[in-house]
Image (cartoon, helix red, strand yellow):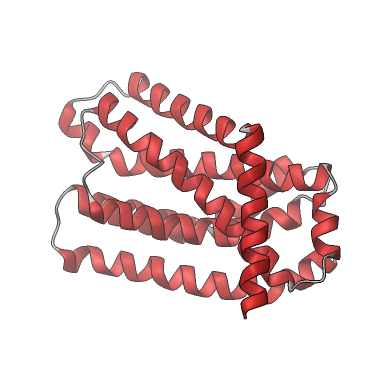
Amino acid sequence: MKGFLRAMLAVLWKDLAAEMRSRELLSAMLVFALLVIFIFNFALDLEPATRASITSGVLWVTFIFAGTLGLNRSLAIEKDRGCLDGLLLAPVDRAAIYFGKTAANMIFMLVVAAIVLPVYSIFYNVNLVARPGLLLVILLGAEGYTAIGTLLATMAVQTRTRDMLLPILLFPVVIPVLVAAVKASAGFLQALPFEEIQPWLNLLVTYDVVFTAIAFMVFDSIVEE
């Protein structure tokens, strides 16, 4: 177990250190996310009350698209530089590689969310920062999204049409996460009773556990193919 954690943290640190040097991945995700918010702000010329009602949908569309861009680039960089083959040749449990890559992708997505939330609050005049419930939903949604996204990105990166293939594979699978995250976020933003939000939180937690377990079990077979 100690060796597994050490290998996983080594993969995570490698990705974070590479990103701190190049800032290639986060820059692309941030620019894309901020452009989406900027375009929605001017395209949807709505009343303040209507803007508040669409906040959860706009937020999650932004996170999902920016996250897909990050997943594509994360694995494409590994493949193009030959790092993926080097990782697979390393004498470590391949599940540690999967969890290290997933943790790195999740951190990148959360960093984007941490910057997008205050910017969105300014543009749309909706306070999204001091809302623990919304932050919990973002954490659960990012975990489920990156858990299955990292697995499918590993499959797609082996093909020449990886940029198109990943969204086609990923979006149908993450519909439960997207729906549950939008509903739960809207519930917290509208201050609904917790009993009405709890089923969506349960769905998010169940999705996270099930798809993380599936990815853990099949990752070794996928990279072998």
Q: Nearer the viewer, residue 57 or 85?
A: 85
Which quarter of the picture shows residue 9?
bottom right
Residue 70 falls in which quadrant of the image? top right
User: Is 93 left or right of 99, judged from the image as shown?
Assistant: right
Q: Is residue 118 above or below residue 97?
A: above
Q: Is residue 92 above or below residue 59?
A: below
Q: Position of residue 44 (x, y in %)?
A: 32, 24
Q: Quadrant of the N terminus?
A: bottom right
The spot of residue 195 in percent (x, y) is 17, 69
Residue in front for this viewpoint, 52 or 9: 9
**Is residue 177 in view from this perspective?**
yes
**Residue at (16, 48) in percent of width and height:** 190
Please state the horizontal and vertical placement of residue 139, each as a whole percent of the image: 40, 56
Q: Residue at x 83, y 43 (%)?
A: 81
Q: Residue furthest bottom?
A: 1
How many numbered circles does the render carry?
0
Taking 37 as reference, is 217 left or right? right
The residue at 45%/47% (across/down) is 110
Quadrant location of the C terminus in the rendered image: bottom right
Residue 94 in the image: state x and y as whole percent.
Answer: 74, 70
Residue 167 appears in the rendering:
no
Looking at this view, is 77 or 170 the one in front? Answer: 77
